[in-house]
Amino acid sequence: MDPVNSFVLAPIGELHLPPDAHPTKGALMRQTSRLAKAGVVVEGGIVSFVGSAAGAISHAPRLDRIDLGKFLVTPGLIDCHTHLSWAGNRADEFVRRSLGETYEQIAAAGGGILASARAMEAIAIEELTASIVARCDLLADLGTTTIESKCSYGLTPEASLKELRAIQDAAAQADQTVVTTYMGAHAIPSGETREQFIKTLLETMIPAASKTSRFNDVFCEEGAFDVEESRTILEAGIRHGMRPKIHSDEFNALGGTEMAVSLGAVSCDHLLQVTESGIRALASGNSVAVTLPGTALYLDKQYADARRLIDSGCAVALGSDFNPGSCQIPSMAFAMGLAVSKMGMTPEEALTAATVNAAAAIDEPSGTLSIGERADICVWPCSHLEEMIYEFAFIRPQMVFVAGERVV
Ligand code: NIG
Ligand code: FE
């Protein structure tokens, strides 16, 4: 009998792998490797061989072999930016935007994030947990093998603890690896002053969240938190062992990207309005530039200039930003298609952005399918990467493996 989670994938029509630098910056992002008649061996959920089909078969002649001669194989896709944990829905806002109101106007009128915060306070933890698990299952079907989820709608100490617990419980049930980012600093709850809320964040919510969250995030934007407030909030996270992340330059360039890079942020996300100085900071610093084209599509905003970010030497990643308000688009393949059609990326850069650079944006060692790495793998029903991108609106993987276990 074969050892658990051990098998040979051979022959593979096209094995397409990103570079293995975590992260890969600038021009190197398109240096992917494309292998025809390839083979991969997985032993005990870990990649033990990558190379030719013949090499794979002779490396492990006794293991079961899966013939993928007509298929594209990539590392599992990594979604480095979601707000998977939400309650209720905001379909009404989608319709209001179609009639002319903007996302910012709806938020200023008490909808938006505050509407989701009210729903978060009301939901029972069991229902919240079940809905997060269901969304993880949906993402597995779409080929996402590692998920970052923010805890971002619980804006009171109680609601935020409930939300953190639900994410932990869901992570234990989900097939994928789930990494938590704390984002109490998403909006100022109604009925509280900004001073009061920031004090509660610093003294109560961030210390509590640091027990289960790897990162601390802030929405640095007009109507949310300014640059100095964002700095204070991120520094508090650092003191509690959480590396910073930031939502910056989404609607207005305030200087949050530059500030977060100077604090050693793991990533700066959105960047629709990123300035030349923000780009320079990202290119010379260690923060990954996370682009979220689904949000630009969903809110009908201009796209982040990924072409310019890459040509300036930044490490660019992709995320879905799947959330109840600004983006109901869960598919990373869809994000890759938008990256190519709307942001000027090549298919190779989109693959790098959705795998190794997305892993770097959440400090995960995976995403390259190299020897010794966890066997997170997608098998796509097409023969080349270009075909996967071209079919972005409907393509779903044929098989998905997480740590060598078939989940789809
Ligand atoms: O990443 N920009 C702020 N936060 C989320 C959306 C939150 C919401 O609208 O619920 C985002 O787009
Ligand atoms: Fe977000």
Image (tube, rainbow, N blue to C red):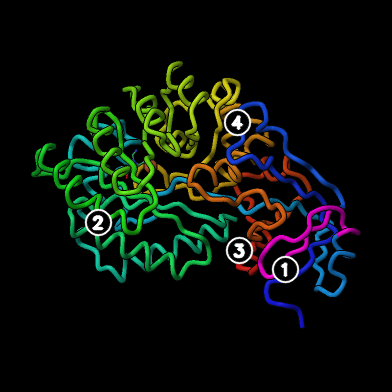
Residue 367 vertical position relative to residue 335 in the rendered view, above or below: below
As measured in the structure, the alpha-carbon distance from the residue carrying label 3 to the one carrying label 2 is 30 Å
Mark 4, residues whose alpha carbon is within 10 Å: few (<14), some, or many (≥20)? many
Looking at the image, tell me whether mark 3 or mark 2 is earlier in sequence order. 2
- Locate the N terminus by quadrant: bottom right
Q: Is residue 27 left or right of residue 261?
A: right
Q: Looking at the rendered structure, which numbered label has been put on residue 402?
A: 3
Looking at the image, tell me whether mark 1 or mark 3 is earlier in sequence order. 1
Marks 1,3: beta carbons within 8 A = no
Q: Is residue 35 left or right of residue 368?
A: right
Q: Looking at the rendered structure, which numbered label has been put on residue 25?
A: 4
Quarter of the image where one finds residue 350: top right
Ligand 1 lies in which image quarter? top left
The residue at the point 68 percent across, 36 percent down is 347
As measured in the structure, the alpha-carbon distance from the residue carrying label 4 to the one carrying label 3 is 26 Å
Q: Secondary structure at mark 2?
A: helix
Looking at the image, tell me whether mark 2 or mark 4 is earlier in sequence order. 4
Looking at the image, tell me whether mark 4 or mark 3 is earlier in sequence order. 4
Marks 3,2: beta carbons within 8 A = no
